[in-house]
């Protein structure tokens, strides 16, 4: 009977383990699966230029991609499966054209479609977006968001576009996120204040207890001293009484002796024995023989990383491509949202220490990319000194392998920590790469002319690096993890060990001032390409 019960328990336990394992597999599969989403170019209406609408469309696409909930199709992916005429017809489809948009979405293989328009009446812009579900019999519009921006500058309009995109998919706007952060900060401060008051109260209680204990101990000591004095006084009295007793006995004995001597008949005088002379001898003190030892103080100096017997040069140029590199010395800095106006993935602020490395003075240009690969991927092909764009992370790895094979060096993408260390001039308190005046240091949506610009035209960072807050965003080598700052190592962090997206840093010609901050973090799939995404290289100091 006991054997049967034991078998039933074992079978039941095995079934529970298998069920838990299958549930974990299902949850992991559901977590990894992301529905595809296609964003059409905004339809320019009522005096809005098409190029401006295209730039705002990039912002919508980037914002939806940043949430990480969808697999956002690039424009190149859409163009690969749909004709130009089909795309133009889809962009121009109004509310009554929802069925066409659903059919178009099914044709290009996406679950969700985002379409809309941008119009201008006088000084007021109006942004309209709608989201369509292409799946099932009840496919159609699932959400609409309209928002106007009156007398607003371009950067304010960009914030409006980002807010509309966030509302469309049920995400908090920048203002809502900032409010929530302020409330959390307020709660934290109140909690900190309450903890400080509690700490002070406990300290005061401990002080009072300590004072009472001191008084009690002092009273005990005083009591013991009084008892000791009484004991000593009694003992002294006994000693004096004993001395007086002995003195009386001695006097009585002397008197008796004299009486006896007076009655003796013999008068012989007895010479007392002479006491032997006592000579004391003084011992000679030994001489001290201690010698002081003087420590050998040696002066050492650090000359920095040395390769081939000589100090590293501060700059050098790659002979194959002409790419210029600048030395970033080793150092430590506080990484993250030090100004308090960033996103949640820029927190907490934490100390990071970086070894010395070389970083590209400029973003890799179209001329340099073509020299190595024989190809130019860029949309804005205006000259060799314009930054290369539309290069995916995978394209960059192919470029690096070719360059390293030709040069014999070991170039690579920067880590996210190296990028921010360089952008902030070795950890300075600077909002943008090169200073706090964005127009002086970056090409962004307000001054770029809706296009990339030649590299090296704006003010550089302290070490002499250009365009890290604008022109094109830049790939990093790390896997993206929104919570990585909470457990990042202190020395030379290299990002999460795995993930689905790679880190992207820096602002761009189509982005606003918020995105251009030196601490802003973005993410994109390794195969993702865009007209505002490029890269620059680094070289570890051990391989100049």
Image: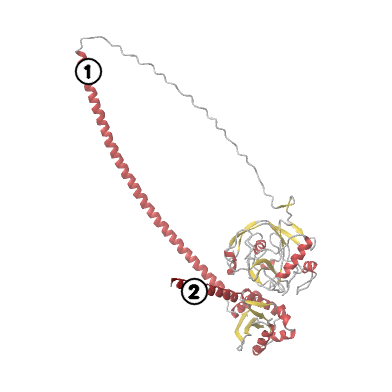
Q: Mark 2 sits on what residue?
A: 12
Secondary structure type for disc 1: helix
Q: Which of marks 2 and 1 is nearer the N terminus?
A: 2
Residue name at image x 73 percent, y 70 percent = 395
Q: Position of residue 88 (x, y in %)?
A: 72, 85
Asked if residue 224 shows in the view, the reply is: yes
Is residue 433 left or right of 236 when viewed as pictured? right
Residue name at image x 28 percent, y 39 percent = 230
Q: Where is residue 405 in the image (x, y as percent from the top left)?
A: 77, 63
Along the line of sight, which residue is nearer the eye, 416 or 431? 416
Quarter of the figure with residue 165: bottom right
> What crowding class fits label 2: few (fewer than 14 Cα within 10 Å), some (14-19), or many (20 or more)?
few
Q: Position of residue 213 (x, y in %)?
A: 36, 51
Q: Are marks 2 and 1 in contact (CB under 8 Å)?
A: no
Q: How many labels does the image show?
A: 2
Quadrant location of the C terminus in the rendered image: bottom right
Q: Where is residue 204 in the image (x, y as percent from the top left)?
A: 41, 57
Residue name at image x 61 percent, y 81 percent = 148
Q: Residue furthest bottom?
A: 96
Quarter of the figure with residue 532: bottom right
In the rendered image, the vertical position of residue 484 relative to residue 53, given as above or below: above
Quadrant location of the N terminus in the rendered image: bottom left
Q: Mark 1 sits on what residue?
A: 257
Asked if residue 456 shows in the view, the reply is: no
CA distance for labels 2 and 1: 115 Å
For residue 66, the mark is none
Along the line of sight, which residue is nearer the eye, 470 or 292? 292
Secondary structure type for disc 2: helix
Quarter of the figure with residue 512: bottom right
């Amino acid at each position: 009977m006991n054997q049967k019960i034991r078998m039933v328990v074992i079978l039941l336990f095995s079934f529970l383990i298998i069920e838990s394992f299958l549930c974990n597999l299902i949850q992991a599969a559901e977590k990894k699966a992301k529905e595809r989403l296609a964003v059409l170019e905004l339809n320019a209406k009522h005096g809005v230029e098409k190029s401006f609408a295209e730039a705002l469309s990039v912002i919508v696409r980037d914002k939806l991609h940043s949430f990480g909930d969808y697999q956002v199709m690039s424009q190149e992916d859409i163009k690969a499966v749909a004709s130009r005429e089909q795309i133009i017809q889809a962009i121009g489809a109004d509310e009554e054209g929802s069925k066409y948009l659903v059919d178009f979405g099914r044709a290009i293989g996406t679950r969700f479609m985002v379409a809309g328009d941008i119009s201008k009446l006088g000084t007021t812009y109006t942004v309209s977006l709608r989201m369509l579900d292409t799946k099932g019999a009840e496919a159609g519009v699932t959400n609409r968001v309209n928002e106007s921006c009156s007398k607003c500058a371009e950067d304010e309009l960009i914030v409006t576009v980002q807010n509309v995109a966030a509302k469309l998919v049920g995400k908090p706007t920048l203002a809502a996120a900032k409010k929530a952060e302020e409330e959390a900060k307020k709660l934290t401060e109140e909690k900190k204040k309450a903890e400080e008051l509690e700490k002070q109260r406990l300290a005061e209680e401990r002080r009072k207890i300590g004072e009472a204990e001191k008084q009690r101990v002092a009273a005990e000591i005083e009591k013991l001293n009084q008892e000791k004095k009484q004991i000593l006084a009694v003992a002294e009295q006994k000693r004096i009484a004993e001395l007086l007793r002995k003195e009386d006995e001695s006097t009585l004995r002397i008197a008796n002796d004299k009486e006896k001597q007076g009655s003796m008949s013999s008068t012989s005088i007895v010479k007392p024995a002479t006491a032997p002379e006592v000579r004391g001898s003084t011992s000679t003190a030994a001489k001290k023989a201690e010698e002081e030892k003087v420590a050998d103080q040696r002066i050492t100096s650090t000359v920095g990383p040395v390769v081939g017997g000589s100090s590293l040069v501060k700059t050098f140029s790659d002979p194959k491509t002409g790419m210029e590199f600048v030395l970033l010395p080793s150092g430590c800095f506080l990484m993250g949202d030090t100004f308090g106006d960033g996103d949640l993935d820029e927190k907490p602020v934490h100390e990071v220490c970086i070894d010395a490395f070389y970083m590209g003075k400029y973003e890799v240009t179209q001329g340099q990319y073509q020299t190595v690969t024989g190809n130019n991927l860029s949309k804005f092909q205006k000259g060799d000194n314009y930054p290369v764009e539309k290069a995916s992370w995978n394209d960059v790895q192919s470029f690096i392998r070719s360059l390293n094979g030709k040069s014999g060096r070991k170039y690579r993408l920067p880590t996210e920590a190296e990028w921010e260390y360089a952008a902030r001039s070795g950890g300075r308190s600077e909002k943008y790469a090169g200073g706090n005046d964005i127009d002086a240091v970056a090409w962004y949506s307000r001054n770029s002319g809706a296009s990339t610009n030649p590299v090296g035209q704006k003010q550089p960072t302290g070490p002499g690096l250009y365009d890290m807050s604008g022109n094109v965003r830049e790939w990093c080598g790390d896997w993206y993890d929104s919570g990585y700052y909470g457990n990042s190592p202190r020395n030379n962090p290299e990002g999460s060990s795995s993930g689905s997206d790679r880190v992207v840093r820096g602002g761009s010609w189509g982005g606003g001032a918020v995105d251009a901050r030196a601490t802003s973090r973005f993410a994109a799939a390794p195969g993702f390409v865009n007209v505002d995404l490029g890269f620059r290289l680094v070289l570890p100091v051990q391989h100049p």
